[in-house]
């Protein structure tokens, strides 16, 4: 929008206020302190000052993004040097933000705030002030804010292709640095020590590697994006059939890399991926209930628990009924024999949960299912039922999973494969369902239940089916979780699991499998891999949920239908309205 | 919507069986407990007193839920965290006052007022920020969107408190005025329980007066009846909504202080369960109805304290009190299944 | 469509095949319950030969590098006091050794991981993260017995010892039990069989005939309660008049205390943690019937300043059982160093001495089996190290005289009972 300088300045200052508030918040809540321990790019001379840490990047990102935002919104029309003015506004916003943070540094240094805010220690102040005293630190911070804002603004001023190139470059460098704990051991394992020493140092990327990656990605991105780029034209010229084959080949390579990963990496990485796998299956199941059928289930962890406990009771020799399956067919087959039972039981539980709540919609359905989930959690750990499910001592001593003919799975490196197999199976089921008649019935049900009912869709049956199928996938995940851990304790089935799974499908995009995979990797894989996250991962979940709903409710990888649904009202507003009464969309 | 003609469905039979089973269970359990003589009359009075005081707190929180639902038709899932943050700020003020030359000891009443003020103001602020940042942009979104946002906000606020204040359980400093016991009608009660009930009643009376007698209160009622018509009548809907959130926040803040004194515990997760139980209370009483929230709150408090012992003790269930939350959640589930409009609610398409 | 199905099926089969053909260097390992082989490292022997002979190889520490010890403790959340308590105790031991010249001239460095408490899966993740760190002498942990169950095998497969300063569940060192933590798990914390029995003995000696118990849904509390009840009955025909349970996070205990008050037992035993235990102590005072009841708990509440501060008057007369950890060395040497680390003037919990002893045991065992090579590299053969640790006997530590049995229980079986008198814990039993 076009603005006079004074109004623009006011707008920039307002944004600066938000920048300041955000950076102060990040400091007070302890994220800066925690992330300052995570080096991203090593400095000159190893790990001396000048290491770029995740904390620093996080702090700098705020004015940077704000700068981009300001520059895109504040334009000065055809005035000469308008680009510079926009950048100036961006810098101004960064400056104001930095000023506020600087003020905070001075205050925090003077007053012992950590009586109340435990994260605001003198150590934190030192980090914020770049190791200098409070006054100098405040000045530095102000300058950094201004510069970051200006840089953000400048990047916004570039044309979109260049901008995308630079942002991708930065993004890929960050990602590479964050994945250091995974990539470094791999390089070690496959004994590419020279490469390893070049790329990684002092816990993060080396400067050389960072610069090289940045240049490479920007170069490639640029080459790809420029008009009349020879490379892209050549690619486009390839006939469709060949392109599909190439696509397949790339996918196959990707899958092969995935499958080799546990062999060349540590048990920890495999465990992280196994964990991602569990949540992925849960998310695929919940996706059926929430994404396809539109039934918001907040008690989904109940299926996880039922699956885990059922498997445990059936195959552990020390369970309340003595693990009859294990006794009957031995440890090699016990798991496989129990799987159909687990699926049956969880499907039944799904129907039992779904039946009484058929008439409920939206909020109420969510709360009731929350209640069910909590009731399940309490009952599983209670004294009242301990003779069946073990109470606080849970069920222990499950035998390992055996793949018949191939032996026993022990350790996450082995479990990785069955988990991937089951997750692929779940994805396949979800995918087939979404494209089937059932899926279309669910679509209709989700969009408008009354209309669906009127057009002959048996909403009762389809709702129950959604609960049953979604629950079955959740139960499968629980069963795998149980054998991998070889114990089942009630403390693993808290409400936060349900919310995490919900966050995954919200972030990834309800209704698409690709989105669910990305969501699981980001929300479960990343915090597991980055130990610095710790409990802050839940803060990120909450923020992600709110941000997604406000900014992009259809998620990162939405299906076309969902995107249309969720922006219905926006589109409606932009179209000329016929003289209709205020009909609210549900 | 046309009502489906009554048919004998499997589902209908199951629901009927469920109804019968629950009633039977309640009756049998209660009978067994009362005839077993395992618990004395004094015990029941103690449990009842505890239930009333907790119920009063639930009622205060439930009012926040019901007011917001009335005007926005959405469940403010993060209301429990509004309560929690108010409790925390009250604690900091109380600790500060305590260390300020024993101010709290010399002027306990003023000190307490200060604590309440701090808590209520903080809660109000948090509620207002929530409304402005998370809910207002989503006014016209499909109904699930604000609910999910609220869940996210709840999580976010919880872990903000975790990050800022730590994970250790804290407490309010002990206040002479609030400790000890009092004698009423020959029964001995904890002083803090009585004070909680009295304080809650006072606040609720103030709320009643506000909603019934003042212009803003009338505006609130109008907006909750029909938002668009109220707007046509010249009522500033946005401002009314803001005021609704503010009042809900004030009440939750007061509840936070009372809860902390009653249970001697403040931690970042303290809002989750009371939040859900207060919401249950609001639903039980009929969401959107102020009387309903109050009655619901008291009922939930009593059911939760008296219920497990009454129903399960006689049946020989081990450690019945472990299941007190199950009672609350069961009430929630049952009310929503069988009578979603609650006791005092309006008939509305759920 | 068909093509997709065929591809997916092929992929599925491929994955299963790969799983089977996995060389298993991240997975299959010798079963942890196989009998251990004794290997004797001789001083001055060729390190290469010794390491070759050792089943798990050697830990190699280059010259000038620190010796790394991992910790898998609960350092966030409600039980963080317990985890940090052990962490600081360990640090005191390491700092002392460093000041005295270091272990083979090297500093001791800790790698900390959060093992959590409620969810057993976090124990597994912490253990795997530590294995991925690599080059650890041993790991100290976990805090809650539940998390040790998956963690111990993960470390044991790599030949890394998991030694706990606070896991007290009897099942971890019981080879008959499904929760047996294996050959590489040991502890300086006492076995709850001892603690529960000690409380029963105390109760019997006081002449109590009836008792009630409360547990909080954790394995720890539940086991303690069970042991106590059994011992109380067998030692002096004590009667359990009421058994109750609460949930962690509960704040209102009237419903639990009321039936107990009605039964008016001589002893109320609630071996749980703060804040539930603290609140029960306070709220019990609201019941006049319980005035004559002895309130008793276990090491989860022993010495806890939070309890004294919060319960105040109500805590007078409260007793708790737990390990003994006192003496001149404790007061004059250990506590100042510990307090400097914790920043408080009271200890966070009661397991810091166990952590201290655990680290000193590690140091002693390392000194016994470590071999310094010609180039200054230190070699510590893992199986030998494990055997040396398990062979510890008559080791003088802050918690008493430690002797490890074959299953990993090393604690000095001295349990004391302390009472709160005038706002402080005083040992009252055994006299």
Image: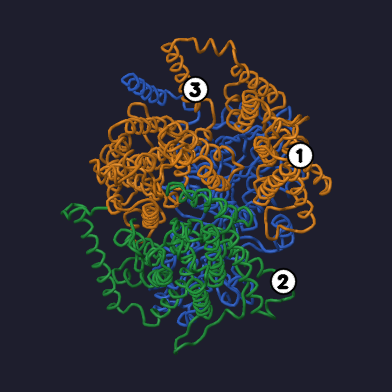
Chain colours: A orange, B green, C blue
Q: Nearer the viewer, residue A131 or A65?
A: A65
- At numbered mark 3, what does the secondary structure look like: helix, strand or loop? helix
Tell me the distance, in whole angstroms, between the alpha carbons under discs 3 and 2: 62 Å
Q: Chain of mark 2?
A: B
* Residue marked by disc 2: B99
User: Residue A25: where, in percent of width, then height?
Assistant: 66, 50
Tag nearer the camera, 2 or 1 = 1
Q: Dot 2: few (<14), some (14–19), or many (≥20) neighbours within 10 Å?
A: few
* Residue marked by disc 3: A257
**Is residue C391 among the parts visible in the rendering?**
no
* Residue C396 sits above or below residue C274 on the image: above
Q: Chain of mark 3?
A: A
- At numbered mark 1, what does the secondary structure look like: helix, strand or loop? helix
Tag nearer the camera, 1 or 3 = 1
Tell me the distance, in whole angstroms, between the alpha carbons under discs 1 and 3: 43 Å
Q: Is residue A59 left or right of residue B65?
A: right
Quadrant of the image for the N terminus of chain A? top right
Q: Chain of mark 1?
A: A
* Residue marked by disc 1: A146
Tag nearer the camera, 3 or 2 = 2
* Residue B214 sits above or below residue A349 on the image: below
- At numbered mark 2, what does the secondary structure look like: helix, strand or loop? helix
Tell me the distance, in whole angstroms, between the alpha carbons under discs 2 and 1: 42 Å
Residues flagged by tags 1 and 3 on a common chain: yes
- Outermost bottom residue: B186
* Residue A411 sits above or below residue A356 on the image: above
**Is residue A108 among the parts visible in the rendering?**
yes
Q: Nearer the viewer, residue B64 or A584?
A: A584
User: Residue A415: where, in percent of width, then height?
Assistant: 43, 33
Q: Dot 1: few (<14), some (14–19), or many (≥20) neighbours within 10 Å?
A: many
User: Residue A69: where, in percent of width, then height?
Assistant: 65, 38
């Amino acid at each position: 929008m076009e603005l006079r300088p004074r109004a623009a300045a006011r707008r920039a200052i307002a944004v600066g206020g938000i920048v300041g508030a955000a950076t102060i918040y990040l400091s007070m809540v302890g994220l800066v302190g925690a992330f300052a321990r995570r080096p991203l790019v090593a400095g000159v001379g190893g790990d001396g000052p000048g290491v770029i840490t995740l904390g620093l990047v996080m702090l700098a990102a705020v004015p940077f993004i704000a700068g981009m935002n300001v520059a895109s919104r504040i334009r000065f029309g055809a005035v000469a040097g308008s680009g510079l003015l926009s950048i100036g506004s961006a810098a101004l916003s960064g400056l104001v933000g930095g000023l506020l943070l600087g003020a905070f540094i001075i205050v925090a240094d003077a007053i012992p705030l950590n009586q109340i805010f435990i994260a605001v220690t003198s150590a934190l102040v030192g980090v914020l002030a770049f190791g200098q005293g409070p006054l100098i630190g405040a000045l530095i911070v102000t300058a950094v804010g201004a510069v970051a804002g200006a840089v953000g603004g400048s990047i916004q001023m570039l044309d979109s292709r260049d901008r995308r190139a630079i942002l991708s470059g930065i993004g890929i460098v960050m990602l590479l640095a964050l994945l250091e704990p995974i990539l470094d051991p791999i390089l070690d394992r496959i004994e590419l020590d020279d490469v390893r020493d070049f790329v990684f140092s002092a816990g993060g990327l080396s400067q050389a590697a960072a610069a090289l990656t940045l240049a490479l990605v920007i170069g490639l991105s640029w080459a790809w994006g420029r008009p009349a780029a020879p490379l892209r034209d050549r690619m486009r010229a390839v006939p469709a059939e060949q392109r599909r084959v190439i696509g397949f080949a790339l996918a196959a390579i990707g899958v092969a890399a995935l499958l080799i990963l546990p062999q060349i990496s540590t048990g920890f990485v495999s465990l992280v991926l196994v964990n991602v796998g569990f949540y992925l299956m849960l998310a695929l199941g919940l996706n059926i209930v929430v994404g396809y059928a539109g039934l918001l289930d907040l008690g989904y962890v109940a299926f996880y628990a039922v699956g885990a406990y059922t498997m445990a009771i059936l195959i552990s020799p020390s369970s309340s009924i003595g693990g009859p399956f294990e006794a009957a067919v031995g440890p090699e087959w016990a798991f496989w024999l129990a799987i159909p039972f687990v699926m049956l039981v969880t499907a039944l539980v799904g129907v039992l949960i779904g039946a009484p709540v058929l008439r409920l919609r939206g909020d109420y359905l969510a709360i009731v299912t929350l209640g069910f989930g909590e009731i399940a959690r309490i009952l599983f750990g209670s004294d009242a039922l301990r003779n069946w499910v073990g109470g606080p001592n849970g069920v222990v001593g499950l035998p390992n999973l055996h793949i018949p003919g191939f032996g026993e799975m022990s350790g996450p490196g082995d479990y990785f494969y069955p988990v991937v197999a089951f997750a692929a199976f779940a994805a396949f089921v979800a995918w087939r369902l979404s494209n089937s008649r059932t899926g279309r019935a669910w679509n209709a049900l989700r969009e408008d239940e009354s209309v669906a009912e009127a057009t002959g869709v048996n909403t009762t049956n389809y709702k129950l089916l959604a609960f049953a199928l979604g629950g079955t996938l959740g139960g499968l995940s629980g069963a795998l979780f149980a054998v991998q851990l070889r114990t089942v304790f009630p403390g693993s089935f808290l409400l936060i699991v349900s919310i995490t799974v919900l966050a995954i499908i919200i972030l990834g995009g309800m209704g698409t499998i690709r989105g669910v995979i990305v969501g699981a990797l980001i929300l479960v894989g990343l915090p597991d891999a980055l130990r610095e996250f710790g409990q802050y991962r839940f803060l990120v979940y909450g923020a992600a949920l709110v941000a997604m709903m406000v900014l992009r409710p259809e998620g990162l990888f939405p299906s076309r239908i969902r995107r249309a649904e969720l922006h219905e009202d926006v589109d409606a507003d932009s179209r000329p309205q016929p003289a209709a009464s205020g009909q609210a969309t549900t | 919507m046309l009502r489906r003609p009554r048919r004998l469905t499997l589902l209908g039979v199951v629901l009927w069986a469920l109804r019968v089973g629950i009633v039977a269970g309640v009756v049998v359990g209660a009978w067994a407990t009362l005839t077993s003589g395992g618990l004395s009359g004094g015990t029941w009075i103690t449990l009842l007193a505890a239930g009333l005081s907790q119920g009063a707190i639930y009622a205060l929180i439930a009012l926040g839920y019901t007011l917001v639902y009335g005007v926005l038709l959405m469940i403010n899932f993060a209301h429990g965290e509004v309560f929690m943050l108010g409790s925390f700020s009250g604690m900091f003020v109380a600790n500060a006052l305590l260390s300020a030359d024993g101010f709290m000891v010399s002027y306990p009443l003023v000190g307490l007022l200060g604590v309440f003020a701090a808590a209520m103001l903080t809660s109000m602020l948090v509620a207002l920020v929530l409304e402005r940042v998370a809910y207002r942009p989503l006014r016209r979104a499909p109904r699930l969107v604000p609910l999910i946002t609220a869940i996210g906000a709840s999580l976010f606020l919880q872990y903000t408190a975790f990050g800022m204040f730590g994970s250790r359980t804290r407490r309010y400093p002990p206040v002479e005025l609030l400790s000890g016991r009092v004698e009423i009608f020959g029964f001995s009660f904890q002083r803090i329980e009585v004070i909680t009930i009295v304080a809650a009643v006072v606040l609720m009376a103030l709320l009643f007066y506000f909603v019934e007698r003042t212009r803003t209160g009338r505006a609130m009622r109008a907006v909750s009846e029909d938002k668009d018509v109220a707007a046509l009548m010249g009522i500033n809907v946005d401002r009314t909504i803001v005021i609704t959130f503010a009042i809900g926040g004030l009440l939750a803040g007061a509840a936070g202080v009372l809860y902390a004194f009653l249970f001697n515990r403040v931690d970042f997760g303290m809002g989750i369960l009371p939040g859900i139980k207060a919401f249950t209370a609001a639903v039980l009483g009929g969401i959107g109805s102020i009387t309903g929230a109050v009655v619901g709150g008291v009922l939930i408090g009593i059911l939760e304290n008296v219920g497990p012992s009454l129903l399960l003790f006689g049946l020989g269930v081990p450690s019945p009190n472990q299941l007190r939350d199950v009672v609350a959640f069961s009430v929630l589930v049952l009310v929503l299944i069988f009578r979603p409009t609650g006791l005092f609610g309006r008939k509305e398409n759920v | 469509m068909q093509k997709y199905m065929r591809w997916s099926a092929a992929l599925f089969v491929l994955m299963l095949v790969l799983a089977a053909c996995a060389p298993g260097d991240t997975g299959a390992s010798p079963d942890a319950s196989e009998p251990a082989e004794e290997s004797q490292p001789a001083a001055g022997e060729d390190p290469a030969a010794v390491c070759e002979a050792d089943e798990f190889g050697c830990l190699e520490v280059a010259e000038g590098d620190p010796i790394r010890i991992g910790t898998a403790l609960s350092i966030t959340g409600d039980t963080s006091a317990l985890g940090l308590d052990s962490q600081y105790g360990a640090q005191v031991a390491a700092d002392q050794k460093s000041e005295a010249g270091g272990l083979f001239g090297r500093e001791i460095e800790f790698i900390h991981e959060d093992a959590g408490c409620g969810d057993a899966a976090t124990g597994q993740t912490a253990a795997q993260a530590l294995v991925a760190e690599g080059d650890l002498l041993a790991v100290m942990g976990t805090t809650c017995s539940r998390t040790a169950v998956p963690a111990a095998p993960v470390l044991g497969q790599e030949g890394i010892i998991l030694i706990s300063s606070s896991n007290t569940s009897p099942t971890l060192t019981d080879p008959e039990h499904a929760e047996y933590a294996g050959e590489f798990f040991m502890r300086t914390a006492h076995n709850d069989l001892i603690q529960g029995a000690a409380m029963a003995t105390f109760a019997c000696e006081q002449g109590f005939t009836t008792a009630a118990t409360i547990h909080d849904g954790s394995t720890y509390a539940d086991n303690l309660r069970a042991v106590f009840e059994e011992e109380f009955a067998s030692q002096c025909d004590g009667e359990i008049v009421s058994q109750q349970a609460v949930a962690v996070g509960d704040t209102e205990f009237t419903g639990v205390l009321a039936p107990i008050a009605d039964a008016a037992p001589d002893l109320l035993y609630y071996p749980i943690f703060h804040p539930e235990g603290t609140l029960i102590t306070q709220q019990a005072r609201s019941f006049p019937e319980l005035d004559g009841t002895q309130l008793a708990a276990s090491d989860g509440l022993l010495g806890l300043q939070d309890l004294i501060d919060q319960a105040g008057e109500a805590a007078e007369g409260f007793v708790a059982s737990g390990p003994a950890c006192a003496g001149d060395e404790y007061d004059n040497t250990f506590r100042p160093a510990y307090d400097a680390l914790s920043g408080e003037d009271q200890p966070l919990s009661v397991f810091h001495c166990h952590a201290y002893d655990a680290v000193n045991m590690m140091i002693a065992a390392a000194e016994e089996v470590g071999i310094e090579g010609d180039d200054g590299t230190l070699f510590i053969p893992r199986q030998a190290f494990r055997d040396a640790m398990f062979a510890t006997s008559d080791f003088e530590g802050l918690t008493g005289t430690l002797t490890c049995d074959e299953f990993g229980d090393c604690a000095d079986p001295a349990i004391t009972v302390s009472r709160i008198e005038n706002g402080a814990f005083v040992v009252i039993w055994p006299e």
